[in-house]
Image (cartoon, rainbow, N blue to C red):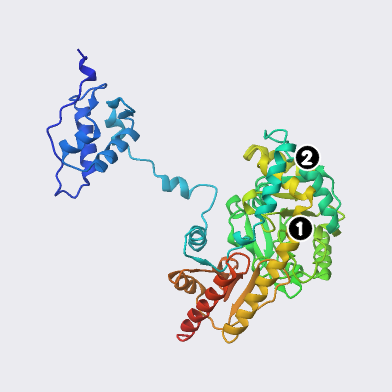
Amino acid sequence: MANKTSSIVNIEWKPDKTSNIPIFKQIVSYISNKISKGDWLIGNKLPPQRALAKMFDVNRSTIVAALEELTSLGILEGKSGQGTTIINNTWSLLMSASPPNWQRYIDFSIHKANSPTIQTINKLEFVDGITRLSTGEISPELFPKEMMKKVLQRVPERAYSLNYLEPLGLFELRKILSQHLTKYGIYIPPTCILIVSGSLQALQLISLCMLQPGSTIFTEIPSYLKSLNVFQSAGMKLSGIPMDSSGIMPWILNKKDNLEETSLLYTIPTFQNPTGRLMTETRRQELLDWCKTNRLPIIEDDAYRELWIDEEPPLPLKAYDKNGMVLYMGSISKSLAPGLRLGWLAGPESIVERLGDVKMQTDYGASSLSQWALTEWMESGLYEQHLLILRKHLKERRDLVLHTLETYFKEIATWNTPAGGYYIWLRLNKNISTDRLFEIALSEKLLINPGSIYDFSNNQHIRISYSYASPDELVKGLIKLSELIGEMYQYY
């Protein structure tokens, strides 16, 4: 005969379906009270879910919800084939304590939340039926599937393991990157290259171990960096510097009093995000000379360099750097596949070693498989073949978008003609709310990036990308967008 503590409990009660209290909450309260008063003991079993649903005269899903809550509180335990058992009669301590205020934890966390607009963009980029007119990714149509298949077939032959790698990353990859960078006038050994999980991680590492709270990060106006909180989350300030047609104008800083020893400058000189602007060779030299004179280190983000369309861009700032002033970031997120999550940072060996040490504390290294795959991509020559094909497609897409803009936007906006990269920086002729346009476009299943997320003040721009949506989607989406803008113009 079973002992008392293993017996099935008796139930002679039903929830009040006219009450404002949810039924499953009433059931939770009823079971909790039975346990607290000692009517039901540790070891007692509850009837099966179907039986409970019949006893309480409710749907089985309601029973499941109630039992899940009681289980999460540590009062019940359910085991497959053994039913649900009472395991704790101290529920009153659990129930009487206020639940943790998770929002307070979130509010006081180190990382700041994205703006509501950016959060919306990040979510809707994965919703079917949305035309993505601003997405800064390579289109699935342009992904080199057959080449990737060849690469992945060869990786097992050379990847002797997929264990953790040394702090700076796979040596074979750093070696081929060292050779690759010589094409751009950068001569740096593998010991001065750190493999990171994308350029964003490089920025995070810099903010963690090289800068003090209160430091100032100077960048172009507008800037991709403004859409991130990577430095602000570490207690640093962003300060914008205007651009002209040649690029950023560093001498504007002479009029500022906040140039500090802990400041640095972040720039995308080649096909800048979001404007697509290309810094001239003369301006690059002027920028480097000015920063050298004023002891202002530079972070050069060169993610778009290999996506030139009309002609090869000037050499990177790092190519002219003779004093270790520049930390150089590269990535294959824009040129090959963001999902590989690989980038690199090149700089003085002491800095790279320090960043590598902190990286080991944060994630213990980027994906070993991805690093072996990228090594094969570059050593095999397939990467260069892919770039030739990709540039051709990007030119076709850019020219298609420019033609569409010329046809449908001539009276409502102006724009630049980028020589490479992904983006066209569209400026509206009238002072309408681009945030309101963002909302109206969403209602028509169009996703755009308003210029406000990249600027330090409101502006009248939209970032248009020709890299992601299909050519047909680009044309149809832009025509619809022109109609929405025209309708808004009627009220201004």
In the image, is residue 136 above or below residue 246?
above
Q: Quadrant of the N terminus?
A: top left
Q: Is residue 25 left or right of residue 314?
A: left
Q: Foreground: 54 or 277?
A: 54
Q: Which mark is residue 385?
A: 1
Instruction: Give the x, y percent position of residue 385.
Output: 76, 58
State whether residue 484 appears in this view: yes
Please give the name of the residue rendered at 78% of the width and 44% of the height, measured from the top-left corner: 174
Instruction: Give the x, y percent position of residue 408.
Output: 57, 83
Tell me the residue that label 2 is attached to: 171
Q: Foreground: 221 or 146?
A: 146
Please give the name of the residue rendered at 65% of the width and 78% of the height, measured from the top-left corner: 402
Please give the name of the residue rendered at 52% of the width and 57% of the height, measured from the top-left corner: 114
Graded by Cα atoms within 10 Å as few (under 14), some (14 to 19) or many (20 or more), the crowding at tag 2 reads: many
| Camera-nearest label, 1 or 2 | 1
Q: Secondary structure at mark 1?
A: helix
Q: Which mark is residue 477?
A: none
Q: How many marks?
A: 2
State whether residue 301 appears in this view: no
Furthest-left residue in view? Answer: 12
